[in-house]
Amino acid sequence: MVILYAQSMSAVQKDIKLVETYRKVDQNMELRCISARSNDSKVGELLVRFQKDKKLLILDGVIVEKEFRRQGVGTYLVSFAEDLAQRFSAKKVLLCPFPVDPSAYPKKELIKWYRKRGYMLNRGLMFKSIK
Ligand SMILES: CC(C)(COP(=O)(O)OP(=O)(O)OC[C@H]1O[C@@H](n2cnc3c(N)ncnc32)[C@H](O)[C@@H]1OP(=O)(O)O)[C@@H](O)C(=O)NCCC(=O)NCCS
């Protein structure tokens, strides 16, 4: 297990550690699963895939445990994915706004949530350019 970030989040008022739980690397692709933990409990998860040939980071999933939502954890995970994209020299982050928990967070709200974080909708997918 690799601890990636261990910093205090003022929004959450808790120490959140980002821990890499899985990594798969091959010639064209790099997959990483990152778990957000607080006091040894899992508070969220992030799954990203970097497509080397297209210089594209695909955000496959962001999930925050129900009791930790609306505390800034999701925003923190997305900004970590964007940091990773920058480190990989990716030009874009791409995602499909598919709600895992539609009763709690319907698609319309999810799209709004990503829009507020700088993502644009195009043909059902959302993307953000990385500078
Ligand atoms: C979508 C999801 C990841 C968002 O995670 P989250 O941790 O709740 O997100 P954040 O706390 O960063 O942002 C949620 C809102 O809470 C607000 N917020 C942040 N800190 C806050 C605080 N201390 N008090 C009150 N509100 C706060 C944010 O301003 C934000 O509102 P906004 O969208 O109007 O800006 C989460 O709802 C989830 O896991 N959904 C189910 C899984 C899913 O569908 N994932 C998407 C896959 S693509």
Image (tube, rainbow, N blue to C red):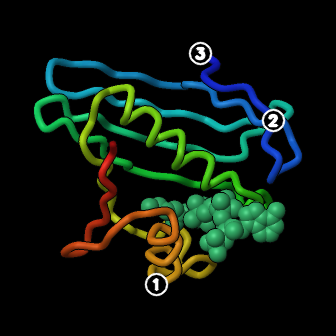
Asked whether the residues under the numbered discs 1 and 3 touch, taking CB atoms below 8 Å apart as contact, a structural biologist would say no
- Which quarter of the picture shows residue 2? top right
Q: Residues within 10 Å of mark 1 (few under 14, many from 20)?
A: few
- Frontmost of labels 3 and 2 is 2
Q: Is mark 2 on a helix, strand or loop?
A: strand
In this rendering, the count of numbered labels is 3
Q: Which residue lies furthest to the top in this view?
A: 1
Q: Residue at x 33, y 69 (%)?
A: 120
Q: Which mark is residue 108?
A: 1
Q: Quadrant of ligand 1?
A: bottom right
Q: What element carries label 3?
A: strand
Q: Is residue 84 above or below residue 98?
A: above
Q: Name the residue under label 3.
A: 2
- In the rendered structure, the answer to whether residue 38 lies left or right of residue 5 reads right
Q: Alpha carbon of mark 1 to alpha carbon of mark 2: how far?
A: 31 Å
Q: Earlier in the sequence, mark 1 or mark 2?
A: 2
Q: Whole-percent x and y of residue 96?
A: 32, 63
Q: Mark 2 points at which residue?
A: 8
- In the rendered structure, the answer to whether residue 47 lies left or right of residue 124 reads right
- Which quarter of the picture shows residue 98? bottom left
81, 116: nearer the viewer: 116
Q: Which residue is drawn at 48% across and 33% down?
A: 33
